[in-house]
Amino acid sequence: MGTATNDQCMPYNGFASNPLTSSNVCVLVGHSIEAITSAVVLASLGQRVHLYADIDLLAQQIQQYSFEHHLQALWQMYVQQRVITSQALPDSAETLIQYYETANHGDSHVVSQSIHSDDQNKVALYWLFLDSIKSAWTEDGWIRAFNQSHQQALPVIMSGIKELGAVSALSERLQRAWVYYIPFVFLQDGDAYNSMLNPALWLLGEKTADSNQHLEMLQPLMQHARAAHHADIATIEFARSSIMAMLATRVSFMNEMSRLADSQQVDISQVSRIMGLDERVGSSYLQAGWGFGGNTLPTELAKLQQSSKMHSLDMPLLQSVVHINEDQKELIFRKFWQYFDGFIDNKTVMIWGGSYKAGSGRTAGSAIHPLLALLWSYGIRTLVYSDKAQGELAALYEQQPLLELISSPYQRINDAQAVFLISWSPRDRLDIDKINQQAMPVFDAQNTFTRSQIERLVGDYVGIGRSK
């Protein structure tokens, strides 16, 4: 990470700005982006944070999310100030808990003395990111450790995506009363820090009803949420999965309708805007394109399907959502193949964007991967511009001779016979004049172009459910 000034690192001014207002410690366990974001947000709220994780995976995660500039700058500042300290995850939860329950820290060999130079390590809460600990701690082991703890009044928070009812079952096995579940339905890739400080929807699962007052350090997040709901953990789990499945369904529905729109010469983008005017429908997740990627939606659907199989239930709608989404990722290539009547061997094409969504630097589940594989199978040279995902693509395909990563979208444009758009931020202006210098076809897998931009193109335009 680069060096950032304090001006760049200032916490959100709606909350506490003094990171040393608390003598308590929030103990977080995990290396996920959710764990990193939570550590930074808690530090911004005036809490001291001890983060335990696989150090290599933590460093890798921080590097992969280098596009989260604000989060990175704050992380660096709080680490330098020792408001956040990170340490290798011990082999067992029992070892970790014993450290904080041992009066004489000098007798403990859990952590190096350099990480906790003070003796005021009074724990405020434990926050477990389940996806991060499953490979290090056995379920029986960490539950037994927490049940044997002498500090049963401390709250334990769990976060992560598991099969329906799994977190609720874990909470029942924990003997303490103050157990909570926080799903990160509010986290926005590319704006993780601000989206957690001002959550669009705050869901809190409680083992003991109406007990959120025991999470005093999280009260500012609950109060600043645009919408919030507290319920039992099983209900919050089910709500989390239902929300994500509904969003995925809306995407796949619009993508299926886009194919019909092609046959009717109707612009699906205009249809989406009209649908959004109906308050019963709303406008979110109605944009046709190459589908959805990332980690959250695909993982959620996979867990839902596992849950249905465990209960011997068929979920044909969800199966269709997944099938449509996977097939949609190859649709733009098929349009390209049809446009050239199959004569595509050894061409050179340009691809703009590689991440699974505009503003992110992650390519997990992105349509760029099947597109590249199909193009390379025909010996097609690919010139790729993806500012935020450049590093990830370089690492994934460093041995691929047909891939060339370029530093600007219009670099080498004269060498290309077609342009693909995979993810393009609306904030980045498209230079139609530069595209028109080549009069080549544009294959817009994200439906980025406006109707006026399409009409200005000299070459052809092929989108998802829309054309010139």
Image (cartoon, rainbow, N blue to C red):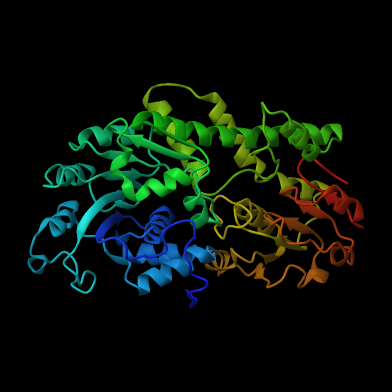
Residue 330: image location, x then y, percent? 67, 46
Residue 294: image location, x then y, percent? 54, 49
Residue 443: image location, x then y, percent? 78, 52
Q: Quadrant of residue 223?
A: top left
Q: Is residue 232 above or below residue 24?
A: above
Q: Nearer the viewer, residue 160 or 353?
A: 160
The residue located at (38%, 35%) in the rendering is 163
Q: Is residue 362 above or below residue 385?
A: above
Q: Is residue 102 left or right of residue 348?
A: left
Figure label count: 0
Residue 45: image location, x then y, percent? 39, 57
Q: Nearer the viewer, residue 236 or 5?
A: 5
Q: Is residue 220 left or right of residue 251?
A: left
Q: Nearer the viewer, residue 86 or 122?
A: 122
Residue 46: in sight, yes or no?
Answer: yes
Q: Quadrant of residue 48?
A: bottom left
Q: Is residue 43 left or right of residue 435?
A: left
Residue 53: in sight, yes or no?
Answer: no
Q: Is residue 235 above or below residue 158?
A: above
Q: Is residue 431 above or below residue 202?
A: below
Q: Nearer the viewer, residue 50 or 307?
A: 50
The residue located at (21%, 34%) in the rendering is 173
The residue located at (44%, 65%) in the rendering is 62
